[in-house]
Amino acid sequence: MPEGDAVYRTAARLRGALDGRTLTRSDFRVPQHATADLTGRAVLITLSRGKHLLTRVEGGLTVHTHLRMDGSWLVTPAGRRTAPGDRVRLILANAEWQAVGVRLGMVDLVRTGDEARLVGHLGPDLLGADWDPDEAVRRLRAAPGRTIGEALLDQRNLAGIGTIFRAETLFLRGVWPWKKVGEIEDLDGLVALAQRLLDANKGHAGTVTTGDRRPANATWVYGRAGRPCRRCGTRISRGEMGMRPQERLILWCAGCQPR
């Protein structure tokens, strides 16, 4: 699933194509909004909120989308042919550009004043202008018996982090993923590092946490299961965390992140 940095970049692309322009096409291909028509309305702004996207249009309406595992937004010149079949969920276009939502995991149309129904449960956005590390730490500490690996992925605690940045953050802090939140001495430092990693990656495609942008050298543990740790040589471990069916991939180094 795209993480906060990728969704942030997607919002930037949508802003560049749609903001301040009047929609000449509005094609919702999801049953609940099949009859909705936004043509003639100007797009005000598109924002990312963790892994969610909010496109606000004139008349007090907001288009909410979520990429989930397979979704993406493609921005092309207006009028270009779109993908065949049922892959396209939504098209928003103006005289110059069209934004095509492919395999979107969520598509909603709500009053802008009702956005909280969809994103109000989220914790502080790691890449938001109103990022609040103290609030993120407070939410994490509210469940001290929970594993830090599960707590970091809970978007109600802090919004935007996924399996890649979870693995990289915990490795760099030397924290075993199954350690309890209440046992972590410097939770503030851990949260601050997670925010710095996402912020450093929001401006470019791909994930780089080592400082080396070559694909084979870009990460410490993610994507390196079974390979030697770059620091200590221990083979990187791979497993799953969480209750089924919500379990998610986790990678760690048993040498650098001891129990």
Image (tube, rainbow, N blue to C red):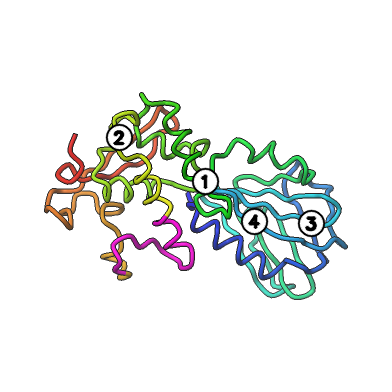
Q: Earlier in the sequence, mark 3 or mark 2?
A: 3
Expressed as whole percent of the image width and height from the top left, the position of residue 222 reads 30, 52
Q: Nearer the viewer, residue 86 or 255?
A: 255
The residue indicated by pointer 3 is: 57
Expressed as whole percent of the image width and height from the top left, the position of residue 214 reads 30, 70
The residue indicated by pointer 1 is: 132
Judged by its main secondary structure, the magenta piece is loop
Expressed as whole percent of the image width and height from the top left, the position of residue 136 reads 48, 40
Q: Give me the C-alpha separation between circle 3 and circle 4.
A: 12 Å
Q: Height in image: 96 above or below 130? A: below
Residue at disc 1, secondary structure: loop
Q: Nearer the viewer, mark 4 or mark 1?
A: 1
Three-letter amino acid code of the residue under disc 1: Asp
Three-letter amino acid code of the residue under disc 4: Leu
Disc 1: CA contacts within 10 A as few (<14), some (14-19) or many (>=20): some
Location of residue 93 by image quarter: bottom right
Residue at disc 2, secondary structure: loop
Q: Give me the C-alpha separation between circle 4 and circle 2.
A: 33 Å
Expressed as whole percent of the image width and height from the top left, the position of residue 229 reads 17, 53
Q: Are marks 3 and 4 in contact (CB under 8 Å)?
A: no
Give the residue furthest to the top.
145
Residue drawn at (35%, 45%) of the image: 190
Q: Give me the C-alpha separation between circle 2 and circle 1.
A: 19 Å
The residue indicated by pointer 2 is: 184
In the image: residue 227, left or right of residue 24: left
Q: Give me the C-alpha separation between circle 1 and circle 3.
A: 27 Å
- In magenta stretch: residue 203: yes
Q: Nearer the viewer, mark 4 or mark 2?
A: 2
Q: Earlier in the sequence, mark 3 or mark 4?
A: 4
